[in-house]
Image: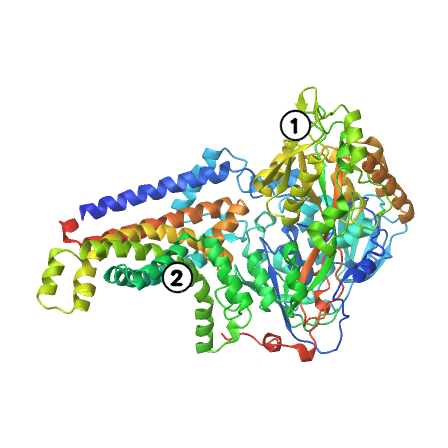
Amino acid sequence: MRNSPPSHHRGRSLLLAGALAALSACTSKETPVGGGATGGTVVIDAPSDPSTLFPPLISEEVGRWIQDLVFDRLAQIGPTMVTVGDKGFTPELAKAWTWAPDSLSIAFSIDPRARWHDGQPVTAKDVRYSFQLFTDPKVGSSSASTLTNVDSVSVRDSLTAVVWFKKRSPEQFYDAVYQIIVMPEHVYGKVPMDQLRTSPVTRTPIGSGRFRFSKWDVGQRIELLADTANYRGRAKLDRLLIVPADPQTQVARVLSGEADVMEAFPSDQTAKLDSSKVAAAVIWPTLGYAFIGMNLHAGATSAPHPIFGDARVRRALSMAVDRQAMLTNVFGKLGLLSHGPFAAGFGLADTTIQLPPFDTTAAKALLDSAGWKAATPGAIRTKNGKPLQFAVMAPSSSVPRRQYAVLIQAALRRVGAQVDIQIVDPRSVMYPKMNSGDFDAVINAFNPDPSITGTAQYWATGAAPPNGQNYLRYANRDVDALLDSAAKSFDPAKAKQYASRAYKDIAADAPAIWLYDYVLVNAVNRRIDTAPFRVDGWWVNLPDWSIPQDKRIERDRIGLAPAKP
Amino acid sequence: MRRLAARLLQSLIVVVIVTTISFFVIHAAPGDPFAYDSANITQAVREHWRHQFGYDRPLLEQYARYVVSVLHGQLGYSFQYGEPVTVAIRDAVPRTLLLAGLSLGLSFLIGITVGVLQAVHRDGWFDRASSAVLLVFYSLPDFWLALSALMLFAYVWRVLPPGHIVDPVMHDYMSGWAALADRLKHMILPVGSLTLLTTAGIARYQRAAMLDILPADYVRTARAKGLPERRVVWRHALRTALTPLVTMLGVLFPAILGGALFVERVFSWPGMGSLAANAIGARDYDLVTATVVVGSIMVVVGNFLADILQMLLDPRIRE
């Protein structure tokens, strides 16, 4: 699903300013962490076990939960979510930093109180080693491509690491502090780089975060315990248990109180949360958005698609869809209408972009003018003897997108277009077809990084497969230039202007019908006081979750005592 | 003995064929372990990973390497679980055997009892009522039954835990008896679901077998000798009527393993079924192949044991 926290790179912009505040406004259960007493156990259901607990190779979300709780970064994006410069960042492992006069290096002072969970001090050498881990091809980290602007890391003294850059960029600080998870050299350095992937040492991570890894019983649970002597303060909870379970089992578990948190509660069952005395819905607006994308080319060729190659047809189809009605139909009150190729929570979002309005009369007229005519009212339109008929893929794994497929089919039928729905397995059918260009239209969702390069990953000409995720093979040189200018701007306001112009151009080209912002409903047990959910990961503030004394149940009283032998 | 040896050889050939087919089928499926959609993973990184694990080599070479590694006792590496396949399988097999074994035992116990009673009280109220109930369970899809049981007992009535083999939080802190009770409580729904699914078939089969046997001459003779009806039915008639059911054991074992796949999934039971389902979804090649191999070995062994049992029960086969 989503790929948070942000993990991309150069030139990326910017601000998610205000996003957090917006989030807080949306959450239905945002009681500030209260009390002073620590304790409690939170059971989080997960769709599966993580495939690895080795940060350079973590690519799926459950692994990120554990990574972000067990390990630290040099600094963390602050509450304002500003990613340009260093103003928006808060210290984590680095208690302070100093820029070189030419801005080509930053000296980070490691907090002398910081300790690894095995008691060893965190040193500058660990920072240097971590940079090597994330960039050495023998390790094969997916984050290596995000660190191309970092030239090297040197050690000035045991508590000062200097990060050297190849060139100045608006987000060089973000690159250095956010892309590198600091890991202990004395633990991982014993294993050759090319053997780390399969080394047992990666299954028992030792970090410096506010939770420490305790144990992993595959298929049953992963246990994290509060690091009681942590330099950033003890986590308020005693322990977190991450339990893999089938989604339907998760529903029963969270509603019965066996589990405390379920991410992405099924959208078609949220009424159960409304009536539940055990669990409540907590909205998590993400950086993702969903749309029906139209392939602009015929199959894998460079020839225009016989239907979608014409911008008038794309606009007409957009105008035939009542997006607001569909949103209500699928999500009830919990949906957020999409405003274009970005989520509203994105720092560079421009929610004033004009999208084609819902107007079936105008849609029909536009199709007529594009040569797609109906022989009789209500008939399927044809052009040069070919019917206005195409297939729409939707992933079998997504209930909302399957529902949208049916609604879109009915909506487009009203303007004389025949949609054939293909519900397919995403991994074995949908992504291979999207990569090869062998499809007509697809109901897809993007989960970009919190930067303008996140947008470019999906909409820039150069991001067509295999270089990126521009599966529709949308190409507009103006858009490319605007996205590039936004990414290279040191001024957040200007970056926003460039991005906004790019969005307008994309919206005018109508390569997609923008359906909804990706909003997940998490089910959280009512006895828990949560901290605000961040757009880049609802789990990031888990150390600040708490359970009031009077609401604690049996499992909250275990404390940190070891289990029976 | 010769028959047993031949059966063993046949079983070995079956396992080899199944291994080969599963290896090529999973490799023929679209995608690979590193093909998942992620904007952050570049093509170069994917290629590096494929090269690291030899997935860029010709398929026949990969197969040859796999066979060699299996012969050395190595079943490969699981990307899904980040550990050697042998470790993942080692933990999962006993759990599945426990689930399948208990369900099979209970199904036979209940199925045989019900089948005999149905035959003895042919066309009576018990026969009709139990036939109707069993037919309902016989017709239900396994995942539907498991899901319904989960929702009813774990969510609506909240009398049983919704999945897992033990309470993931409290089990380690329980005393001996409480821990045992916890384990048993977690077994009720998955074992019960699997048992219900198979009991119906066994009962119907047993009923038919008993109806064939009850009019037999030797049963009539036993009655004529004045033996109590209970003894006639449960000792004389049932013993003969059990022989065809032993054949069914060999057929049922694969079926129950197949059913376990769904039941384990629904109840988050970390056995072979869960392992296989996750592995297939993640294109975890080595783990998929290993689960198929181990599954086929279980089936072959199950059939083999059924053969032996049949020989023990039926002197004609021994001869």
Mark 2–mark 1 Cα distance, whole angstroms, equals: 51 Å
Residue to which mark 1 is pinned: A300
Give, as a three-letter code, the residue at label 1. Ala
Q: Which element type, helix, strand or loop, lies under badge 1?
A: loop
User: What numbered label is drawn on residue B196?
Assistant: none
Q: As drawn, which residue projects farthest toward the bottom?
A: A550
Circles 2 and 1 in contact, beta carbons < 8 Å: no
Q: Which element type, helix, strand or loop, lies under badge 2?
A: helix
* Residue A203 locus on image (x, y percent): 57, 58
* Residue B155 locus on image (x, y percent): 55, 66
**Can you see residue A214?**
no
Q: Chain of mark 1?
A: A
* Residue A275 locus on image (x, y percent): 66, 66
Q: Quadrant of residue A33?
A: bottom right
Query: Are there few (<14), some (14-19), or many (20+) residues within 10 Å of tag 1?
Result: some
Tell me if B299 is positioned left or right of A291 in this view: left
Q: Chain of mark 2?
A: B
Give, as a three-letter code, the residue at label 2. Leu
**Can you see residue B269?**
yes
Q: Nearer the viewer, residue B131 or A121?
A: B131
Residue to which mark 2 is pinned: B98
Q: Nearer the viewer, residue A542 or A516?
A: A516
Query: Are there few (<14), some (14-19), or many (20+) residues within 10 Å of tag 2?
Result: some
Indicate whether B314 appears above or below A438: below
Residue at the image position 32 percent from the left and 41 percent from the top: B13
Residue at the image position 91 percent from the left and 48 percent from the top: A493
Residue at the image position 45 percent from the left and 59 percent from the top: B91
Q: As drawn, which residue projects farthest toward the top?
A: A384
Q: Nearer the viewer, residue A227 or B306?
A: B306
